[in-house]
Image: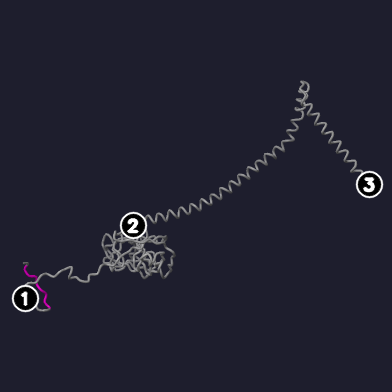
Amino acid sequence: MAPRQRHIDYARPVRRLMLAVILLVLAAIFLFWQIDNPRAERLRAAIVDKVVPPVHWISAPATRLTQMVGSFQSYARLYEQNQELRRELQKMKAWKEAAVQLEQENAKLLAQNQVRLDPMLTSVSGVVLADSGSPFRQSVLLNVGRRDGVVDGWAVMDGLGLVGRIAGVGEGTARVILLTDITSKVPVTIQPSGQRALLTGDNSRLPPLDFLENADDVRPGDRVISSGDGGVFPSGLLVGQVVQGTDRRLRLRLAADYERLEFLRVLRSHPAERLEDTGALIPPPPVFGPPMPPGLLPTPGPRP
């Protein structure tokens, strides 16, 4: 323990002496630099010429290190800005998708508003809640029902053409049987020939046209509208265009966009007025002369 103690006692005075020498040298340099004398100025210039170039080479690594640190900090700021721009870009993409969906919905609603229908036909619009289509049944569910005045059997359209008919009404929902369903039978008129036909669903995108009066008068591309026969649908509703299938049968390309059924319009159609008393509308001609025997029709007499 004694040698270590002597080493410690020897090191303390040396450190104190070195510190005192350094302080004296610094004080001398400070005083020398404050002397306003031509000789002192020349001596200072000579010292600077001798000392600054080596110090420059020594300080070059430190300067380069400082530049590298600054470049790294700049890179870190650029990286943070890049990440922030990426996050903003993701948000903008989400807003873009929402804007595109709103634009499509707006276009469909505008298309529904521009459909020209009979002024006597009013409608109620609904949103498709679910597509319950299957290989054996083609139908969709709407968010309008009995509380909205929807009645079973009413025609349903989108912004382009006829979609189907109401087949089942709940309090707040209604089921729409599509024209492609196998149970769908719609009487139609083919323009410009005026041929009558029956559009029969077969669970395909191109349902066939059956019971044509004269198929030779029908050409692919002819316009097809509802005829109104049987009182199932109002007349004059656009259904689609005639095409020729791969089986050489005349089929119909539906005007409605079945790939994007989102907003549908239910037409408030009313049954035709039934005539209970025809005599009140068409009075019989007056009869003159003796009464005719029962079973014989009267002949019109001379006017008075």
Image position, residue 276 (x, y; %): 22, 71
- Residue at 47%, 54% in the rendered image: 98
Asked whether residue 131 is drawn in magenta, I would say: no
> Would residue 128 be found to the left or right of residue 41 on screen?
left
Q: Quadrant of the C terminus?
A: bottom left
Near mark 3 (Cα within 10 A), the count class, few <14, some 14-19 or many ≥20, is few
Q: Earlier in the sequence, mark 1 or mark 3?
A: 3
User: Magenta segment range?
Assistant: 295-302
Q: Secondary structure at mark 1?
A: loop
Distance of mark 1 from mark 2, alpha carbons? 61 Å
**Which residue position is annotated with label 3?**
2
Q: Earlier in the sequence, mark 1 or mark 2?
A: 2
The residue type indicated by label 3 comes to Ala
| Residue underneath mark 2 | 115
Q: Depth check: 208 or 189 in front?
A: 189
Q: Main secondary structure of the magenta part?
A: loop
- On screen, residue 43 versus residue 148, left or right, reads right
Kindly identify which residue carries mark 1. 290
User: Could you say which is closer to the camera, residue 285 or residue 257?
Assistant: 285
Image coordinates of residue 43 in percent, x first then y, are: 78, 24
Question: Alpha-carbon neighbours of circle 2 within 10 Å: few (<14), some, or many (≥20)?
Answer: some
The answer to whether residue 203 is above or below residue 57 is below
The one nearer the camera, 192 or 272, is: 272
